[in-house]
Amino acid sequence: MITAEQKPIEEIRGMLAPYKRVLALGCGSCVAECAAGGEKETAMLASALRMSARMNGEDVLIQEKTVDRQCVKQFIIPLDDIIGEYDAILSLGCGAGVQAVSEMYQEIPVIPALNTEFLGETRDQGYWVENCLGCGDCMLYYFGGVCPLARCSKHLLNGPCGGSVDGRCEVDPDIPCAWQLIIDRLTRFGALDRLDEIYPPKNWARKQGSGPRKIIREDQQT
Amino acid sequence: MTDSRKRTLALFYCRNVPESNETDRQAIEKAYDERIRLFPLPCSGRLEPVHLLRALEEVADAAYLITCPDGACRYFEGNRRARKRVERTRQVLSEIGLEPERAGIVIGSKESPKTLAQLAGEIFDRICHMGPSPALKDSQAQRRKRRS
């Protein structure tokens, strides 16, 4: 899941200042799960912006709508019927959603209401943690399903560093030591020998080496 | 000086609050005329920040929630959740420059339970010092700002 947090309202108001008719556009997928840009949060933000505009004597129309996914063209298309009524879209999607909507509606500015954060997991209600860097070359098998790149504060592929205390990271005791977790997991599976190997530095070319990445699957295309 | 008798209140309440059935609700609405809008909830945990915000936007100068006493929620944690949601609403109000006291929560007491009518009266006393809300649709303050 992609996680995000709402920008401060003052920053959003600053970006919206030139526009009089705004569509606050929520996304019902990842950002709804992390309570940043779903239907409820979109309604809250739109309401707060309308009140703020009134308090400042501004004559602005702010309406709201939420689509199931802003990052998939087919889910954006239904906006075709209403988009002409607005002179800006305030997107509560992740960065991918903002750009997908921008791509669809070239003539209308699409303003981000969220700061996109990381790929993560809902650990508990109201608690999200980063656990994947999207490196393009998954090594979770070797590390018992715990990613040292995402979850070790020092990103060590050949750990542990020796600095953890009682299974907590020396950088911040709130962080569980990823290498402690890796060793515990591999021990449980009887697979500790996977750590006998020395892992070479990560080849980041798979992630960042050749510009924006894309996946093309002809079998999925029409 | 502002006329405190004209403050309006959107009041959400858990149906567990004493004397809060339909007849009681109608009696309170009659007593306060258009100054109060009552929103019964099956549990205060049903309340979302957007309900209070919408109420402040469209309905009233203040929006409050009455919950059942601590430890008395029929759904165990509804009133605990409600408290956090009211706090979140107040943060949003602060962010837009509206007094956070325009949203509030009253937690019922196990020891000395009060009726819905009594609690509504106490909340009116609490909000009476506030001016009309500048965020309320077509409020007086808003009309003045537009004219100036």
Image (cartoon, coloured by chain):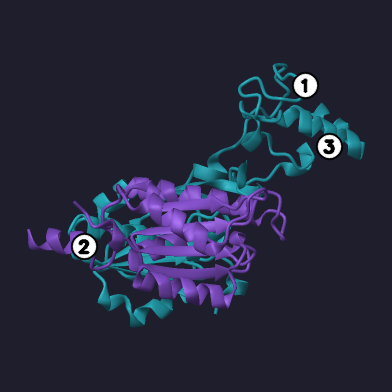
Chain colours: A cyan, B purple
| Location of the C terminus of chain A (image quadrant) | bottom right
Q: In the image, residue A181 lies at what x, y percent?
A: 77, 33
Position of residue A218 in the picture relative to residue B97 (left or right): right
The chain identifier of the residue carrying mark 3 reads: A
User: Is residue B106 in view?
Assistant: yes
Residue located at (58% from left, 48% from top):
A119
**Disc 2 secondary structure class:** loop
Residue receiving disc 2: A19
Residue receiving disc 3: A185
Q: Residue reaching furthest left?
A: B148
Residue located at (31% from left, 49% from top):
B129
Position of residue A196 in the picture relative to residue B126 (left or right): right
1 or 3: mark nearer the eye:
1
| Chain-order first, disc 2 or disc 1 | 2
Tag 2: residue type?
Answer: Tyr
Question: Between residues A5 and B11, which one lies in front from this camera angle?
Answer: B11
Tag 3: residue type?
Answer: Arg
Position of residue B86 in the picture relative to residue A122 (left or right): left
The chain identifier of the residue carrying mark 1 reads: A
Question: Between residues B71 and A105, which one lies in front from this camera angle?
Answer: B71
Q: Is residue B34 above or below residue A185?
A: below
**Disc 3 secondary structure class:** helix
User: Is residue A37 in view?
Assistant: no
The chain identifier of the residue carrying mark 2 reads: A
Residue receiving disc 1: A166
Residue located at (71% from left, 31% from top):
A178
Q: Is residue A220 above or below residue B70?
A: below
**Disc 1 secondary structure class:** loop
| Chain-order first, disc 1 or disc 3 | 1
Residue A160 placement: quadrant: top right
Q: In the image, residue A136 lies at what x, y percent?
A: 60, 47
